[in-house]
């Protein structure tokens, strides 16, 4: 694979729930170390597209390749391949989904120890470093319920990074947060982008997109309407649908 | 003939009845609860399975066992199976009948508790690479346990008292011991009351244990 080959490649992704066609052929290329922001109105398919990348949703057709694991969903997908694809990415959820019965540290260590069977002491050191990276080293022994929403989400990020994924997927990571807690989560994500993590982020935070994204992909009705550099897509959108969406976002009333 | 309470007989019977409790009632309760619970998890998972036949088998099992009296089930195993050449001693017969019975009730508790765990927990487990089995063991069942403790305590407390039915298949436990001492002396009131007090004490201890278990499993939940 040449260094110009994108880390993540998606072609012709299609998915419907019953009669509802959520994705109608999505293509996506994400180069190593870049940040891609997926945005669009509610129901545009952006979250479904993201969830297809790690088979939380199984697409009906299309291919997804991350690194050297490629899956063609048009045929029968065996479990081994799906698992291999899933192992390539880490996922941060809108409502964090931390394991409530485990301490913060256990949450972060769970994947590496139980699934990847790496030595506990090594994992512990890594996990503490990750918690430090998200500013929560002092909370390692707490239970999730003892943390604020922003802190919980930062633990969610540390847990996703702990499995050493090649790419990190964020599904509206700040949408469920109180407004004053959004900044601390976005700051962590910005720091990760600076560290060179490859990220795909579904978000409505346009300032984050402007500052951090390498590419913004605007989706509507299950297709990609417009894509490009944030300055272009958000600053001078060509498509009417993009313009309308941005107007409503900036001026909701 | 009125006799009232024969206190001397109460003192004499305390020892033998305690032996019936410790050697008969408690082992039968403990063994059948553990086996029943293990079977309950299997039945609950079958019931939740996407494979229709598997889920139908689980549904039928629960329906039949909950829909027939425990005493009849016990009699079928102990007195009925010999017609098919299967002759069981009282202990295995009681263990089988009670385990099968407990599992049917407990499986519904386990199923509800598993469903009470949010779907996001399964998804989060999957994204860190866990298989369904690992996710169940490490993430879902520990959380389901918290939900299941109060209703399972009910099941356990009922089971303690239901084991007295094992006396009808000649299994020696607390109640059968009381019957055997009472028969020659005609002190039914005295003996059965002592037995009742023993059952009640065991249930008190279990209620206390339930409170402890709830506190322990609830320590990760905001007050």
Image (cartoon, rainbow, N blue to C red):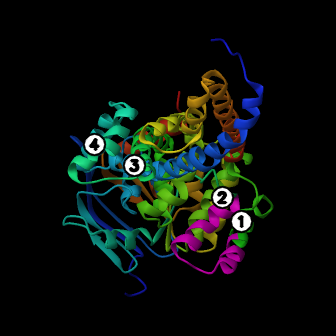
Picture coordinates of residue A119, whole percent (x, y): 63, 81
Question: For the residues marked 4 and 3, what is the alpha-carbon distance in whole angstroms?
Answer: 11 Å
Q: Earlier in the sequence, mark 4 or mark 3?
A: 4
Which residue position holds label 3? B93
Q: CA distance from mark 2 to mark 1?
A: 7 Å
Tell me the mark number nearer the camera, choosing from 3 and 2: 3
Front in this rendered view, residue A26 or B164: B164
Q: Which residue appears at 58% of the width and 80% of the height?
A: A118
Q: Are marks 4 and 3 on the same chain?
A: yes
Residue hosting label 2:
A155
Instruction: Look at the numbered disc 3 and give the secondary structure of its residue.
Output: helix
Nearer to us in this view, A65 or A212: A65
Q: Is label 2 in contact with label 1 (beta carbons under 8 Å)?
A: yes
Q: Is residue B130 above or below residue B47?
A: below
Q: Are marks 3 and 1 on the same chain?
A: no
Residue at left offset 58%, top offset 30%:
B184
Cα gap from disc 2 to disc 4, whole angstroms? 59 Å
Q: Chain of mark 1?
A: A
Question: Furthest residue to the right?
Answer: A138
Please state the extent of the stretch shown in magenta in the rendering: A104-127
Disc 2 is placed on an element classified as helix
- Give the residue at mark 1: A131
| The one of B160 and B174 positioned closer to us in this rendering | B174
Q: Please state which of the two labelled residues, at mark 1 or mark 4, is closer to the viewer.
A: 4
């Amino acid at each position: 694979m040449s260094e110009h080959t994108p880390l993540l490649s998606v072609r012709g992704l299609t998915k419907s729930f019953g009669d509802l066609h959520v994705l109608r052929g999505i293509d996506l290329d994400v180069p190593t170390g870049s940040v891609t922001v997926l945005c669009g109105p509610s129901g545009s398919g952006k979250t479904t597209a993201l969830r297809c990348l790690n088979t939380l949703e199984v697409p009906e057709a299309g291919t997804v390749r991350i690194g050297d694991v490629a899956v063609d969903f048009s045929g029968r997908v065996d479990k081994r391949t799906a698992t291999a694809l899933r192992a390539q990415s880490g996922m941060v959820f809108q409502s964090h989904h931390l394991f409530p019965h485990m301490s913060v540290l256990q949450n972060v260590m769970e994947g590496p120890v139980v699934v990847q069977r790496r030595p506990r002491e090594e994992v512990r050191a890594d996990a503490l470093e990750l918690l430090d990276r998200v500013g929560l080293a002092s909370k390692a022994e707490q239970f999730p319920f003892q943390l604020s929403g922003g802190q919980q989400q930062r633990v969610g990020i540390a847990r996703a990074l702990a499995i050493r994924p090649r790419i990190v997927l964020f599904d509206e990571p700040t949408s469920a947060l109180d407004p004053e807690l959004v900044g601390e989560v976005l700051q962590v994500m910005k720091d990760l982008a600076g560290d060179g993590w490859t990220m795909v982020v579904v978000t409505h935070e346009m300032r984050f997109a402007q500052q951090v994204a390498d590419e913004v992909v605007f989706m509507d009705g299950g297709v990609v309407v417009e894509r490009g550099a944030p300055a272009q897509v958000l600053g001078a959108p060509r498509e009417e649908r993009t313009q309308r969406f941005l107007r409503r976002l900036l001026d909701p009333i | 003939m009125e006799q009232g309470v024969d206190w001397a007989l109460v003192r004499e019977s305390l020892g033998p009845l305690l032996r019936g409790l410790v050697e008969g009632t408690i082992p039968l309760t403990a063994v059948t609860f553990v086996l029943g619970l293990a079977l309950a998890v299997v039945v609950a998972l079958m019931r939740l399975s996407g494979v229709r036949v598997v889920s139908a088998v689980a549904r039928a099992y629960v329906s039949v066992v909950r829909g027939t009296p425990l005493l009849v089930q016990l009699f079928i195993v102990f007195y009925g199976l010999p017609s098919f050449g299967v002759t069981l001693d009282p202990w295995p017969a009681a263990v089988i009948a009670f385990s099968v019975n407990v599992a049917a009730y407990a499986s519904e508790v386990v199923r509800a508790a598993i469903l009470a765990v949010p779907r996001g927990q399964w998804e989060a487990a999957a994204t860190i690479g866990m298989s369904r089995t690992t996710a169940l063991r490490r993430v879902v069942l520990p959380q389901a346990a918290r939900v299941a403790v109060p209703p399972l305590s009910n099941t356990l407390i009922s089971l303690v008292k239901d084991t007295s039915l094992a006396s009808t298949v000649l299994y020696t436990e607390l109640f059968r011991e009381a019957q055997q001492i009472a028969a020659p002396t005609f002190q039914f009131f005295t003996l059965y009351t002592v037995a009742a007090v023993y059952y009640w004490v065991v249930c008190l201890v279990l209620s206390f244990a339930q409170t402890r278990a709830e506190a322990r499993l609830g320590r990760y939940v905001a007050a």
